Amino acid sequence: MVWRRWSIASRLFAANLLFVLVLTAGLAAAMVADAGSRTHEQTSQRMLSVATALADSPFVAAAAAAPDPSAVLQPYAQEVMRDAHVDFITIMDPRGIRWTHPNPAEIGKPYVGSIAQAQAGNTYFETTAGTLGPSVRVIVPIKDAAGTVTGMVAAGVTVSNVQVLVAARIPAVLGLATALLLAGSLAAWALGRYLKRVTFGWGPAELGQLFAYYESVLHSVREGLVLLDTHGSMVLYNDHAALLLGIDPPPSNSPGPRGQASGTRLDALGLPDSLRELLASGRTATDEVHLAGDRLLVVSQRPARAPGANSPAGTVATLRDHTELTGLAGRLNSTETLVEALRAQTHEHANRLHAIISLIELDRPREALDFAAAEHAQNVQLGGEFVGALDEPFLAALLLGKRAQADERGVELELTAAGTLPPDMLDARELVTLLGNLVDNAIEAAAAHGPHPTVWVDLLVADGSLTITVADNGPGLPTTDLDVLGRIGTTGKTSVAPGGRGYGMALIRRAAAALGGSVSGENDGGAVMTAVVPLTRGAAEGGTP
């Protein structure tokens, strides 16, 4: 249970420390064994050199042929042992009877060890127990000019002395092992601190549980969630974000977190320019409206910072689909537009009715009749012109009401139309939303700017499309970038409620997209907005309001 409560850093440090300890112990044992093997080999070679030098010495060969070899060779062997730091040098006859020995009492006795190889004329190495104890020794034959073995030389050191040489190397081996242990422990400690920082001290079980929660939340929320790194590449997104952005969600059985985009560049996703610019910039945004196809997305974006970190690790963007909401707002806006137009017409007709009644009361019926007939002729002419030309009663009713509304605000509204609009080709609700908001924006801009405010509305049906052009002599557009104008809060108006320019532009662009068309803007003595809508029956699926 204690182990399970440890963090990843603690587990890694303990595991790495244990690994380094085992590795150090094994390495130290291997180095000690290697040092022993090397020392044994070096000792054997040194004994070979000493024994070979004695066996090849003319002095030793001559002494071996003398009547009393021990008298000559014993002092010589004692001197060589002192000078060469050899524990024993034993010179013997071909039968193995000693001529010399470190212990004079052993002279004349048989050699303890194997001599058969030397008697055959070969050099022989062995480690065996003799009169001085276990020793590493070499036996070299003494030969005359004819190659006959006339004696043998054995030189060696005791095993205890060899072990002393090995032990002399142990401190160096232990020092190296200690250095490895300290270096490995330091590396494990540094890596553990790094992992503790990046995992916030959580253990694998906690991280696994957190990941399970994270996966569930990521893919169950009804908002699009997008995570981007500091280079503007998409790192992670959920299923709803894939739906809103029109990208393929990764398969659920893919390795790693479901929704991981593996650093996909935004340029490769085919996103709208305004949305791609926002996501790539990493700037903070709150409820910005962006058009993605025929969807209106409300986007909020914040930097992603780890606890205690100063610089962001990326950005987190949330996407909400306001298409239905803005569609309802557009329909409400269209209804309000028609109601406002009817109210303006009612107010205007009430004034004119008062004028007619007053003329009658003044006993001037002829002038009253002429006044009423002129007004009726004008309305019939305007209504007939639009109904006859466009065959769209909703547009005619809307524009007639807008004229009354413009008159009420002191704005001259000039209407022109050309071509024949086939019936049931366009969704009347979206068309009323598009034209109503365009005219409302133009009337408001013209009314707030200088004398003789005028709005021009032209509807042209030609080449399989309906072109709507609305111009005014107001101050013009602050920018012709409709992506910027379509963001709520970028307008200079104080109101950003539905029907205001900030939201109205979003409604205009959404309605145009729903109709399969496009909207553009320019400045030419005022604002000029142009909407081009193709005439296809698929655009009329919404029916009539």
Image: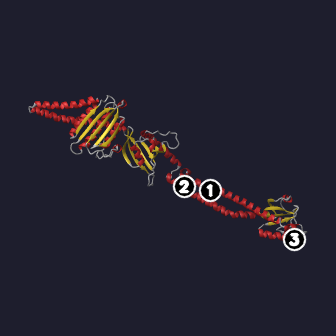
Could you say where residue 488 lies in the image, as x and y percent from the top left?
Answer: 33, 44
- The answer to whether any part of residue 6 appears in the image is no
Could you say where residue 32 lies in the image, as x and y percent from the top left?
Answer: 69, 59
Camera-near label (3 vs 2) is 3
Camera-near label (2 vs 1) is 2
Q: CA distance from mark 3 to mark 2?
A: 73 Å
**Drawn side of residue 264 relative to residue 169, left or right:** left
State yes or no: discs 2 and 1 in contact (Cβ < 8 Å): no
Q: Earlier in the sequence, mark 3 or mark 1?
A: 1
Q: Secondary structure at mark 2?
A: helix
Could you say where residue 483 lies in the image, as x and y percent from the top left?
Answer: 36, 43
Residue type at mark 1 is: Leu
- Res 442 → quadrant: top left
Q: Secondary structure at mark 1?
A: helix
The crowding category of the residue bearing disc 1, from other C-alpha atoms within 10 Å (few below 14, some 14 to 19, many at least 20), is some
Identify the residue under disc 1.
21
Q: CA distance from mark 2 to mark 1?
A: 17 Å
State yes or no: discs 3 and 1 in contact (Cβ < 8 Å): no
Residue type at mark 3 is: Ala
Q: CA distance from mark 3 to mark 1?
A: 59 Å
State yes or no: discs 3 and 2 in contact (Cβ < 8 Å): no
Query: Split into 4 quadrants, where in the image is the C terminus?
Result: top left
Q: Nearer the viewer, residue 489 or 478?
A: 478
Residue type at mark 2 is: Leu
Identify the residue under disc 3.
71
**Drawn side of residue 210 relative to residue 36, left or right:** left
Identify the residue under disc 2.
191
Q: Nearer the viewer, residue 149 or 252?
A: 149
- The answer to whether any part of residue 374 appears in the image is yes
